[in-house]
Amino acid sequence: MITSKQRSYLRTFGNKLQPLFQLGKAGIEQNFLKQIEEALESREIIKIKVLNNSGITAREASDIICESIGAEAVQSIGSKCVLYKRSIKKPIIELP
């Protein structure tokens, strides 16, 4: 669990990011979760765009993904959400 100060710090990184994944009508599948987990291991913070045809909001998608892979939801605005998970092999981001 990250604190509000840490979440605010991570938002500064998230604002600069381009969406790495798009969530569409296929929904959140096991393969999609695996790809997100691998991306989080190498980058620690990613942005996901949730398309209109997915049937869920960005907030719902981030909640489902975070619960499934143990990540932290940093931000969810409009159709985009930012996720963070500390890398086990080589941490990049130092939280305050």
Image: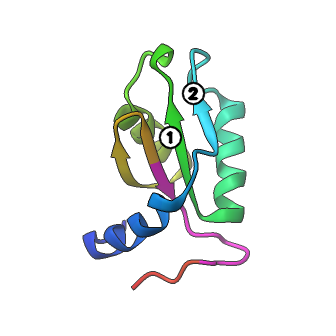
Residue 62 in picture, x, y percent from top left: 43, 41
The secondary structure that most of the magenta stretch takes on is loop
In this rendered view, identify the residue nearer to me: 11 or 3. Answer: 11
In this rendered view, identify the residue nearer to me: 82 or 17. Answer: 17
Q: Within 10 angstroms of label 1, few (less than 14), some, or many (20 or more) residues?
A: many
Residue 46 in picture, x, y percent from top left: 57, 54
What residue appears at the point 71 percent right and 78 percent down from the top-left corner? 90
- Which residue type does callout 1 highlight? Ile
Looking at the picture, does residue 8 appear above or below residue 46? below
Ranked by sequence position, the earlier of labels 1 and 2 is 2
Looking at the picture, does residue 59 appear above or below residue 27? below
What residue appears at the point 39 percent right and 40 percent down from the top-left corner? 63
Q: Assign the C terminus to one quadrant of the image.
A: bottom left
- Residue 3, magenta (yes or no): no
Q: Within 10 angstroms of label 2, few (less than 14), some, or many (20 or more) residues?
A: some
> How far, Cα to Cα, is label 1 from label 2?
8 Å
Tell me the tag on residue 37: none
Q: Which residue is mark 2?
A: 28
What residue appears at the point 63 percent right and 78 percent down from the top-left corner? 92
The image's colour scheme reads rainbow
Q: Secondary structure at mark 2?
A: loop
Q: Which residue is mark 1?
A: 65
Pointer 1 and pointer 2: residues touching (CB < 8 Å)?
Answer: yes
Q: Assign the N terminus to one quadrant of the image.
A: bottom left
- Which residue type does callout 2 highlight? Ile
Magenta highlight range: 82-92
